[in-house]
């Protein structure tokens, strides 16, 4: 009987807590739906630029589901690839044929290179001008040379998304620190006692941001230094830019965690925000190709702070971008932080009434 009474009490508690019910029955469906849409998107077809390549080879490239753009008199091929958003460029120059791969996605680059190898190794005419006949029984590597704009032939997919993981872990742990930290202030009554004093809400928000921010900064610096110097994660650009990106991301996360904690009554309810506020971030951070997702999901990605942080971190660590190249991402992250801080001022208002 006592066990039955306990079971009845637990069931009644869960039914009274609408947020827990949502976590149990809606959150898993939400995450599963996102995963279904992300992993069942369209296959990304590569786009390649060509110069001085014969028409038969162009036809074979298109039959292999490769979009082909023809160019003439290109002076800077690498700049053209980046500006035109190409995945590669096949050009014939004098006696040399060169395949230049963007390699921002190593799996896509290897797939493109494999298709070109298959085309060249067929009995069809080689991708050179007709007057330059070469023996098709030679090795592919002897027929053309391959260059890379980002990374090299040894680049692995982990090298590309590992910078994003650094940002994600900073985002995740700072969210927990700030959210549960402020929640503890509320459950112990400290926040309510503060609110009966003449202190301004802006001063409280600033104090919490600075207080929790000191530990967020230390945590961020430790994660970045450990990832680069111990795990030997690739870093082409400046480590100061990496730290700057993560610090701004931590500020966004601090303000978001403090804001969401205002709507949680316990640590358990704070944890319930993770599947809604944290998990979807990883899907749109750049680890999975956005181009393969439905258009409305690509729009949704633009309201995720980790989308901009992932783009900036990958740009600095893998592509060697400078501060000017990532300034757009940083400005948007600062706008996110500003919005969350303003919302925090309004959220604290209800505690002053108490």
Image: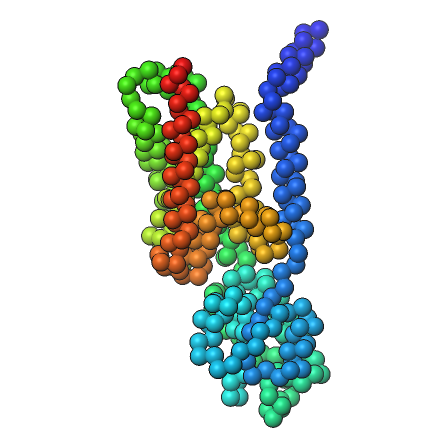
- Position in image of residue 59 (x %, y %): 67, 77
Depth check: give the residue in front, 292 or 211.
Answer: 292
Q: Quadrant of residue 336?
A: top left
Viewed as shown, does residue 50 lie left or right of 232? right
- Position in image of residue 330 (x %, y %): 39, 49
* Residue at screen point 57% across, 66% down: 109
* Residue at screen point 33% across, 52% down: 240
Depth check: give the residue in front, 173 or 128.
Answer: 128
Quarter of the image with the C terminus is: top left
Depth check: give the residue in front, 299 or 268.
Answer: 299
In the image, residue 145 sits, relative to residue 167, either above or below, namely below
Depth check: give the residue in front, 208 or 174.
Answer: 208
Colouring scheme applied when the structure was drawn: rainbow
- Position in image of residue 352 (x %, y %): 37, 18
Q: Residue furthest left?
A: 198
Q: Residue furthest bottom?
A: 131
In the image, residue 84 sits, relative to residue 186, either above or below, namely below
- Position in image of residue 294 (x %, y %): 63, 51
Q: Quadrant of residue 89?
A: bottom right
Can residue 9 be spotted in the picture?
A: yes
Q: Quadrant of residue 30?
A: top right
Can residue 180 be spotted in the picture?
A: no
Quarter of the image with the N terminus is: top right
* Residue at screen point 43% across, 53% down: 312
In the image, residue 205 sits, relative to residue 315, either above or below, namely above
């Amino acid at each position: 009987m006592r066990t039955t009474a306990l079971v009845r009490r637990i069931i009644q508690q869960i039914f009274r807590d609408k947020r827990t019910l949502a976590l149990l029955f809606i959150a898993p469906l939400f995450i599963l739906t996102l995963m279904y849409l992300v992993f069942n998107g369209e296959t990304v077809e590569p786009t390649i630029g060509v110069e001085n390549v014969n028409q038969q080879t162009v036809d074979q490239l298109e039959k292999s589901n490769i979009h082909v753009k023809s160019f003439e008199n290109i002076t800077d091929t690498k700049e053209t690839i980046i500006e035109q958003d190409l995945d590669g460029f096949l050009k014939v120059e004098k006696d040399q044929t060169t395949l230049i791969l963007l390699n921002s996605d190593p799996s896509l680059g290897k797939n493109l290179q494999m298709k070109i190898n298959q085309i060249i190794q067929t009995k069809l005419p080689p991708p050179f001008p007709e007057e330059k006949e070469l023996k098709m029984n030679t090795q592919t590597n002897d027929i053309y040379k391959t260059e890379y704009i980002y990374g090299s032939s040894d680049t692995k997919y982990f090298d590309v998304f590992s910078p994003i993981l650094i940002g994600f872990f900073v985002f995740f742990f700072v969210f927990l620190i700030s959210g549960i930290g402020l929640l503890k202030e509320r459950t112990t009554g400290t926040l309510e006692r503060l609110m009966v004093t003449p202190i301004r809400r802006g001063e409280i928000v600033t104090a919490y941001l600075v207080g929790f921010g000191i530990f967020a900064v230390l945590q961020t610096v430790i994660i970045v230094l450990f990832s680069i110097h111990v795990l030997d994660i690739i870093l082409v650009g400046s480590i100061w830019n990496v730290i700057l990106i993560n610090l701004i991301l931590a500020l966004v996360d601090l303000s978001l965690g403090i804001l969401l904690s205002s709507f949680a009554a316990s640590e358990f309810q704070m944890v319930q925000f993770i599947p809604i506020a944290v998990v979807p971030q990883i899907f749109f951070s750049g680890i999975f190709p956005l181009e393969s997702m439905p258009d409305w999901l690509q729009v949704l990605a633009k309201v995720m702070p980790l989308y901009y942080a992932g783009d900036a971190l990958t740009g600095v660590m893998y592509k060697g971008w400078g501060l000017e190249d990532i300034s757009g991402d940083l400005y948007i992250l600062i706008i996110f932080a500003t919005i969350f801080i303003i919302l925090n001022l309004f959220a604290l208002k209800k505690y002053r009434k108490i």
